[in-house]
Image (cartoon, grey):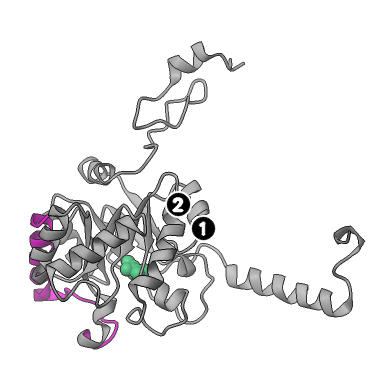
Amino acid sequence: MASNSSESRASTEVPAPYGNGPAPQGQAPERKPAKVRIHHLQQAKREGTRFAMLTAYDQYTAEIFDAAGIEVLLVGDSASNNVFGNETSLPVTVDELLPLCRAVARTAKRALVVADLPFGSYEVSAEQAVATGVRFLKEGLAHAVKIEGGAFYAPTVRAMVQAGVPVMAHIGFTPQSEHALGGYRVQGRGDDARRLIDDAVALADAGAFCVLMEMVPAETAAAVDAAVDVPTVGIGAGKETTGQVLVWQDMAGLRGGRMAKFVKQYADLRSTLMEAATAYGEDVRSGQFPGPEHSF
Ligand code: KIV
């Protein structure tokens, strides 16, 4: 029988930063960091292991995804079209995203929290990007930020990193440039792969700790991953990236409508909530709820 004494705990305790407490008797300790840091993602790249990333925009999803072991939570500008009811990610503002970011960062105990800098909040100058990045770390309590764009933004990334703002770079299809790119289109096909490789190398050289690729052929994404030492994350970019990310409402089937090819749905929350809300409405209208057990 497992003893609870501090003596037996000491013999099985896992050294920091892998401090998840003692391993069950006879089992190898689970090698999970107590807090996911950027260097753990870099370690994953070096060791050929993978990590998972999901968007989160509020307390309960942050709590659940964190407890489920998701390594990175992204307070994405996709809140624009998944929380605020906009059609695209363009209208969401810094002041709208900051409170969502604070809620996620306050709740997550283990995950690395990354915040998107919304459209218009970093493109004007490196100074503007530094100032917005600082706001997300200071007021939003984020651990890092993400910006969209290629090699052109390397000087911006360098300035942000020098100011102490860790940056994840987002290349390939960049939703904030939806209109400039002519809609949702796969990027980096054929000869265009070279452009994405150059973008990734320039951004990594400038200090980006990770490169995220969206809607990029698997072969191109693999070439990008091979060209940089930093970890990569994919969304619609095949399986050769270090990590994968999905928007949580897509992953859990809360959003209705057409899904992108790269989405895998792991639940049907939309039907579950629809059934619950319908049953509740019927119970209220028929006088079934509240019952005596719900009354004082
Ligand atoms: O905002 C977001 O959800 C994103 C993902 C698509 C990576 O940037």
Provide the major secondary structure of the magenta segment.
helix
Which residue is located at x 54 percent, y 71 percent?
Answer: 254
Nearer the viewer's eye, disc 2 or disc 1? 2
Left/right of residue 120 with respect to residue 76 in the rendered view: left
Mark 1 lies on residue: 59
Q: Residue 30: x percent and y percent? A: 42, 32
Q: Is residue 290 above or below residue 9?
A: below
How many residues crowd around disc 2 within 10 Å: few (fewer than 14), some, or many (20 or more)? some
Marks 2 and 1: CB-CB under 8 Å?
yes
Q: Quadrant of ligand 1?
A: bottom left
**Amino acid marked by disc 2:** Arg
Mark 2 lies on residue: 106
Which residue is located at x 42 percent, y 78 percent?
Answer: 81
- Secondary element at image label 2: helix
Q: Residue 48: x percent and y percent? A: 25, 44
Q: Is residue 262 visible?
A: no
The foreground one among 70 and 97 is: 97
Q: Residue 155: x percent and y percent? A: 8, 64
How many residues crowd around disc 1 within 10 Å: few (fewer than 14), some, or many (20 or more)? some
The part of the image, by quadrant, that contains residue 46 is top left
Magenta stretch: give its range.
Answer: 181-207
- Check mark 2 vs ligand 1: CB closer than 8 Å? yes or no: no
Is residue 256 inside the magenta stretch?
Answer: no
